[in-house]
């Protein structure tokens, strides 16, 4: 075993999740690299010290560049706003430090492409933080699909629905300002990532986006609340993706449905330890969807618990992500999903924006 110094930029929602994951991953997965929480950076030194004390970091700073340049920080996790990702990643990669960056990859398609180029030119381990695709259930679904258990895939539907801005009286905040902070920057990347992971590249999209509540107490909203996307995959499969932050009643409505010639699958993140599988086998009178509970026979589950059906949670998906990042560093090679996979999502989002503006189909490889 060897120690590795971890620096995390951002101490909020995801900063805490990554801090807890790095503090836990060695015990959960018995990783060969054992993280040490060296330094945390936040927008102010006061906040950084607060987070550092709560999460167990040795040092704190109000300047992310100080963290990146610190010799004790050997790998960097970016959990700060999207408009900071490019500069931080560029600085870390230039020093040869592996980077795990939260999604979306960057605030603009141009910066996302620069990040991929910097990572590939530096030949440094890089990863983007799509955690939902890493649940034991969805890892199992990926295997079923790739192994042809559902036959030829004929249709895909992906969603990510939440209701944190469903109330029109909810005050204006930072999420209401700038396209990268809207639904297309926040929620939509997750089902797009799921679509790409499960079905492969998307050829073209036809999309419509909407700001449901244009005016809120304290300001006018200038980004989207929801988006619906018709898509056609490069393999010919038809699909549909919907995402919304105004879906009243939905709390973690990340889900998907896949139809094939031999069967179908349904999954809902609000019940993340189960999939519903239909196989076109046996007499029609005995067919039906059956609920499969995840357990030690499914990917990455056994490290958390030996009891089938006992379940994993949100934080566990971040711990799985941390394990993947450490394994990539240990082996000196990138492990899916990388910055390039984050760029693939960003290019679909860009095509969605162009399609909504033009009211027509847009080919993703032409954005």
Image: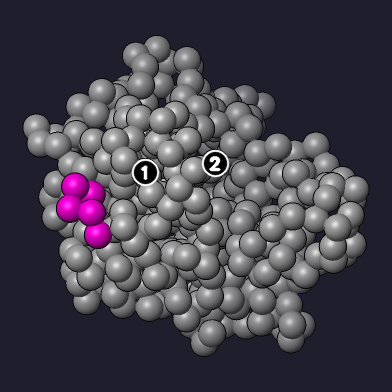
**In this image, 317 relative to 265: left or right?**
left
Rendering coords of residue 343 (x, y %): 44, 70
Instruction: State the residue in front, 164 or 75.
Output: 75
Q: Secondary structure at mark 2?
A: helix
Q: Measuring 40% from the left and 57% from the top, which residue is drawn there? A: 63
Residue assigned mark 2 = 13
Q: Which mark, by number, is residue 3? A: none
Q: Measuring 28% from the left and 63% from the top, which residue is drawn there? A: 92
Look at the image and give the residue range highlighted in magenta: 69-73
Q: Measuring 45% from the left and 47% from the top, which residue is drawn there? A: 45
Instruction: State the residue in front, 275 or 175.
Output: 175
Rendering coords of residue 165 (x, y %): 79, 48
Q: How many marks?
A: 2
Q: Which mark, by number, is residue 60? A: 1
Query: Does the magenta run of residues contain 363?
Result: no
In terms of image quadrants, where is residue 88?
Answer: bottom left
Q: Main secondary structure of the magenta part?
A: loop
């Amino acid at each position: 075993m060897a120690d590795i110094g971890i620096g995390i930029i951002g101490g909020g929602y995801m900063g805490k999740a990554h801090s807890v994951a790095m503090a836990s991953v060695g015990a959960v997965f018995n990783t060969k690299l054992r993280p040490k929480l060296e330094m945390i950076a936040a927008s102010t030194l006061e906040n950084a010290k607060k987070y550092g004390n709560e999460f167990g970091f040795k040092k704190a700073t109000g300047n992310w560049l100080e963290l990146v340049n610190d010799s004790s920080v050997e790998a960097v996790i970016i959990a700060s706003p999207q408009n900071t990702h490019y500069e931080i990643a560029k600085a870390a990669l230039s020093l040869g430090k592996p980077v795990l960056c939260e999604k979306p990859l960057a605030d603009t398609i141009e910066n996302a492409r620069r990040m991929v180029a910097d990572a590939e030119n530096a030949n440094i381990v890089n990863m983007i933080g799509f955690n939902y695709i890493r649940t034991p259930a969805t890892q199992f679904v990926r295997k079923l699909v790739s192994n042809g258990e559902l036959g030829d895939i004929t249709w895909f539907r992906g969603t990510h629905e939440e209701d944190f801005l469903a109330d029109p009286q909810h005050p204006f905040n930072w999420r209401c300002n700038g396209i990268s902070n809207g639904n297309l920057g926040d929620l939509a990347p997750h089902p797009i990532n799921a679509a790409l992971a499960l079905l492969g590249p998307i050829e073209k999209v036809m999309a419509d986006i909407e700001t449901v509540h244009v005016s809120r107490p304290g300001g006018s909203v200038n980004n989207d609340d929801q988006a619906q996307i018709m898509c056609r995959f490069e393999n010919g499969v038809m699909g549909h993706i919907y995402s919304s932050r105004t879906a009243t009643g939905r709390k973690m409505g990340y889900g998907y449905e896949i139809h094939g010639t031999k069967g179908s699958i349904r999954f809902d993140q609000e019940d993340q330890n189960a999939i519903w599988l239909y196989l076109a086998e046996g007499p029609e009178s005995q067919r039906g969807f059956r609920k499969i509970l995840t357990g030690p026979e499914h990917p990455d589950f056994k490290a958390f618990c030996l009891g089938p059906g006992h379940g994993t949670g949100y934080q566990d998906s971040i711990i799985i992500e941390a394990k993947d990042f450490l394994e990539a560093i240990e082996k000196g090679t990138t492990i899916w999903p990388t910055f390039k996979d984050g760029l693939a999502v960003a290019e679909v989002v860009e095509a969605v924006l162009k399609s909504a503006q033009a009211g027509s189909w847009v080919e993703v490889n032409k954005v």
